[in-house]
Structures are given as C-alpha cells and as structure tokens.
Image (tube, helix red, strand yellow):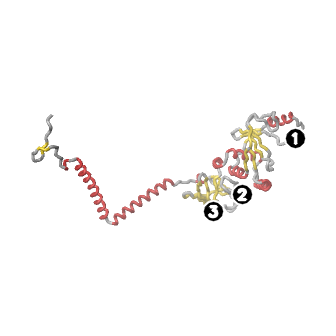
Amino acid sequence: MTKKKFYDENGNEIRSRPSKPYYKKPWFWVIVVLGIIFGSIGIYALVSEDEIADEPAEQQLEKKVDETEHSEHEVLDEESVEEQTYTYDDFKGTYVSFEREPYNSPIEDMSDIIVLGDDFYQSFNRWDFDTTSTILDKTIEGNVLTLDLDSDENEMWGLHSESGTEQFELRHDGDKKVLYSITNDFSLYSMSSRDLQTHYSQSEIDYARIIMTINGEPSLDQWAVWNADWGVPIVNVRYNSAGDHTEVSNEVSYPKDVTHLDLTSQGMAAGIITYSSHGDGHITRFPMPLHYHQEDQSEEGHRQLAQDALDNAETISIEPFEPYTVADFIGRMRFVYE
C-alpha cells in the first residue's frame, strides 16, 4: 500500500495532514448560529420596551383600567353563577328555637314556634298561645323574605307584629337550616320530618313516638314535676330475641324479637312497654305484668301469667306526632341501653 503524502500551501511535502482553517470547523458555525438566535431575541425585547416607553401615559392607564374591569367582571360573573335564587318554597316550613345546642336540647318553652304555610303565618309556643295571620303579600330579595300580614284588628289575637309585617333572613349553618327573624332579632331552626331524621337517632325517634302513643304526650307541667322530683327522666332500653325466656316464667318464651322500654326507675307511671316492631308504623305490644299478684304463686301460676300476656298481645298504630314534639321529648329524656 502506498503511503498518502501531504503538502503545505507552498507545495512542500510535509509529514502530517495540515489543519483546517477555523471557519471550516463545525464548532465555529454552531457559535455563529447561537449568536444570531440570541441576538434576535435581545433586539426584539429592546424594541418592545421602547414601544411601551413611547406609548402615551393615558393609553397605558386605559389598558390597566380595561384589565381591571375585565378581572372584576370575571369575579362578578363567578359570584352571580354561585348566588342562589330563593323562592317562597325555600322559606316554608316549621321553625323552633332550642334551650341550648340546636337539635341536642329541649325546645325552648316560652319561645315561639313559627310556621310559614302556603298562605298563612303562624306563631305559637308550648303553652298554647297561638296567633295566625293570612299572608297578603310576599317579597323576596336575595335570601330575605318580607311578609305583609292581615291587619284586621278584630281578629281574636290581633296582629303578629306592631308593623303588620314580618321579615326573615334564610341562613345555612352546615346541615342546619336557620330562619333569622330580622323583625324580632332571634334565630330559629328548621324542624321538618327530614330534619328529625337528619339530627336524631331513628331508634330514639321510634321510642319517643311509642311512649307518647301509649302514655300520651307529656305536658310542660309534667316535665317540670319529673325534673323537680327525679331529675332528667331516664328510659332504660333492653332487648330480647325470639326464643328468649320471659321475665315472668322460664317456661314461656318470646315468639318474636322484642324491645323493653322501662320507665319505672324515676317514678314515671308508664311502667314497662314490651313490644315487637312491624317496621310499618305498627307494633305488637305484649302486656307483661310489673308485679305478680296472682293467687297461684307456683311455677305453673307464673307460666300461666306469662302465657296470658303473650296471648293478649295487641297491635297498635303508632302516632307520628309533630317533629318538634318528638324532638322535644328526646331532648328532655336520657336513654340508657342495657
């Protein structure tokens, strides 16, 4: 193989390959291209700043005002989308005030319970003071309701307010619906069947309804006597499964699952209510005796007493009662589970 020869620019033979001029090398052109790119960016930035500096101050101010107004419009648009439109249906319902924590204490005795009906306004308390007026006109602005009431002075109870109007603001506190009386400066809480289900135990709702159906709704005077003599009334709750022996006789068993509501521990004359729930607003009550005074005190005598109680079971329809009545009962009682 013949060795390749190299010559310089004058034609003289040299031992190695001559080096390329710098302008023929790749790195030179990389630097040139990068310089052109960054130079163009710098020139564009300088020109933009000069144009802004040369722009009249009034035009700059107008741009800022336009941007501010545009931003404000965006905020207003968002607020208008979030703002709720209320109708009278949102205000309608029954509202109460509580002695202490809402939905966790009794209904306040002397405070008014307010009912906003389709065409009437009612205000009453637990002492049966009741006034009702026809609604002549309704005005709603935002979350504020203004009622123009019947101003007939010849009505039995007269007006509900000196001005003949009532004004309310609808508020929400978490899952609590609040009606604030602007006219009288106090707050009331919604008390519908749905509120009862939301804020109270379903089992205690059932117990309250069963006790009041069988023994009657306690008056405020009765509550006062119980509290004075015994403190907070207690309901002891216990259960038996189908097949468990009765308390009267070990030879007689309950045919169904039963619940016992024992009201005897604090002087309540109701005794013990033993029942089996149908789950449809009805119960089967077993009239189990509190005391065993039968003549035959033998084992057979107790067996017969227990069997008679089961044989004399009766089906009872449970009254629903007003939600505020049930809530007040639960708020005044203490349920103890055995």
Foreground residue among 290 and 40: 40
Q: Is residue 2 left or right of residue 60?
A: left
Q: Quadrant of residue 43?
A: bottom left
Q: Which mark is residue 126?
A: none
Give the x, y percent position of residue 71.
42, 58
The answer to whether 276 is drawn above or below residue 120 in the figure is above
Q: Which residue is labeled 2 in the image?
A: 109
Q: Quadrant of residue 111?
A: bottom right
Foreground residue among 27 and 107: 27
Q: Is residue 171 left or right of residue 207?
A: left
Considering only order in the chain, which callout, 1 or 3, is on the residue closer to the N terminus? 3
Q: Which residue is labeled 3 in the image?
A: 185
Give the x, y percent position of residue 47.
28, 60
Quadrant where the C terminus lies?
A: top right
How far apart are labels 3 and 2 at the CA level?
Answer: 18 Å
Does dot 3 land on a helix, a strand or a loop? loop
Q: Which residue is labeled 1 in the image?
A: 293
* Amino acid type at image mark 3: Asp
Does dot 2 land on a helix, a strand or a loop? loop
Q: Residue at x 56, y 53 (%)?
A: 87
Quadrant where the N terminus lies?
A: top left
Considering only order in the chain, which callout, 1 or 2, is on the residue closer to the N terminus? 2
